[in-house]
Image (cartoon, rainbow, N blue to C red):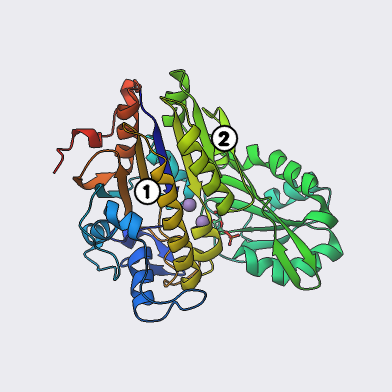
Amino acid sequence: MTRAFLIVMDSVGIGGAPDADAFFNDGTPDTGANTLAHIAQACAQGRAEDGRSGPLRMPTLDRLGLGAAVRLASGEVAPGLGAEPQGAWGAASEISKGKDTPSGHWELAGVPVPWDWGYFPDKQDSFPPDLVDFVARCAGTEGILGNCHASGTNIIEDLGDAHIRTGWPICYTSVDSVFQIAAHEETFGLERLLQLCRDIAPRLHGMKIGRVIARPFTGSEGRFIRTPNRRDFAIASPAPTLLDWTHDAGRTTHAIGKIGDIFSHRGIAHLHKGKNDADLMDHLVRLGTEAEEGSLTFANFVEFDSLWGHRRNVSGYARALEWFDRGAARFLETLRPGDLAIFTADHGNDPTWAGTDHTRERVPVLAAGLGVRALGQVGFVDVAASVAGHLGLSVPAMQKTGNSFLLHSPV
Ligand SMILES: O=P(O)(O)O[C@H]1O[C@H](CO)[C@@H](O)[C@H]1O
Ligand SMILES: [Mn+2]
Ligand SMILES: [Mn+2]
């Protein structure tokens, strides 16, 4: 028996989504968005020099086929990348209608989203009055602050002082199907914030809002900073996922980072969390050595998205990519013959693009452990089929939607 590792680089898209024109950022269609290629181009042109310098360096993932995958997905060149692939490489498209984290992860885990997500309109008073009353009642406050689309770091700058003065929770949303609550860890209380999110989540899930997200922060007098204690309360996936298939077969499942929250803690035997992606990389490298035969390790690295993509910070994103690539090299050294490791992503978040939201893109699929294979254009669900095939799992008949990469001929 052998092991499988599925590693999601949150928001590391490679452009070329066939339906990008149906998705928007501040009214601009996502057509042409390309997270990785645009970062690599900015690096090569000396436009990403903060804390790093020169062309983008990701030799480890590029050896697996990253540069080749960018070209395949979008026809764009990512300067600094483009080595002859030594792994199995391809570009995956998503069919779920959302460009959000749960949609991407569920589909990678074999379950495309069959419903239309609920969204809140981009105007002042985004939330209906009865929902506002309900949230305030659950919070024990006279009202709420925010009630609009916002970037999470901006809204705590704008409303942090008013929050401390009134005690009212800051509620906001985005183009994603989310209801987010920012509250001060000390003055409002972290446990109280988490309980509030837990209490209101069923009602929001009933509206097909994908996640209620607790966004605790700290600080004072206009100088506020978010803490690592974010918690997502996600709607349950509509069908058993790769994690359930693995768990139900009596195998061990390890979840690293946000995977627990994204899958409502279903099918997960061991959850490994940390205060940042560096902690998560340490978990991944350790599990590379320690994970059991026949086990699945499913990891999400969120900081590409949360610290850099949404903040439209190109240098920061490039630094994170280069750091991740060094971590990937450490991890790959731990693999044993017969193991499968797949690096992929859940959506894009092009830091050179309009707005501050995700971008609809294809994602890379880079596999170690399958020899050299050109996988071509594949679907997100093919990732689940490949991991299941590798682990020898039986997949529910109704969910046999993907094609395993093991069926592609080695080059
Ligand atoms: O600006 P922040 O609070 O980071 O919000 C971002 O994080 C949310 C959930 O990942 C997304 O919907 C996006 O709006
Ligand atoms: Mn994501
Ligand atoms: Mn995001």
Estimate the x, y position of residue 295 in percent, counting from the top left.
44, 27
**Mark 2: amino acid:** Ser
Q: Quadrant of residue 405?
A: top left
Pointer 2 residue: 264
Q: Residue at x 75, y 41 (%)?
A: 195
* Secondary element at tag 2: loop
Mark 1 or mark 2, which is nearer the start of the sequence? 2
Q: Is residue 23 left or right of residue 260?
A: left
Disc 1 CB within 8 Å of nearest ligand 2 atom: no
Quarter of the image with the N terminus is top left
Q: Which residue is drawn at 50% across and 67% down?
A: 356
**Mark 1: amino acid:** Thr
- Up/down of 58 relative to 51, above or below: above
Calculate the distance from the C-alpha at mark 2 to the C-alpha at mark 1: 21 Å
Q: Which of 86 and 121 is in front in this view?
A: 86
Estimate the x, y position of residue 336 in percent, counting from the top left.
36, 34
Residue 205 in sight in this render: yes
Q: Quadrant of residue 147?
A: bottom right
Q: Which residue is drawn at 35% across and 73% down?
A: 55
Tell me, for residue 344, which label it has, or none: 1
Q: Residues within 10 Å of mark 2 (few under 14, many from 20)?
A: some
Q: In this view, does 160 lie to the left or right of 82?
A: right
Estimate the x, y position of residue 308 in percent, counting from the top left.
52, 65
Quarter of the image with the C terminus is top left
Q: Is residue 365 left or right of residue 173?
A: left
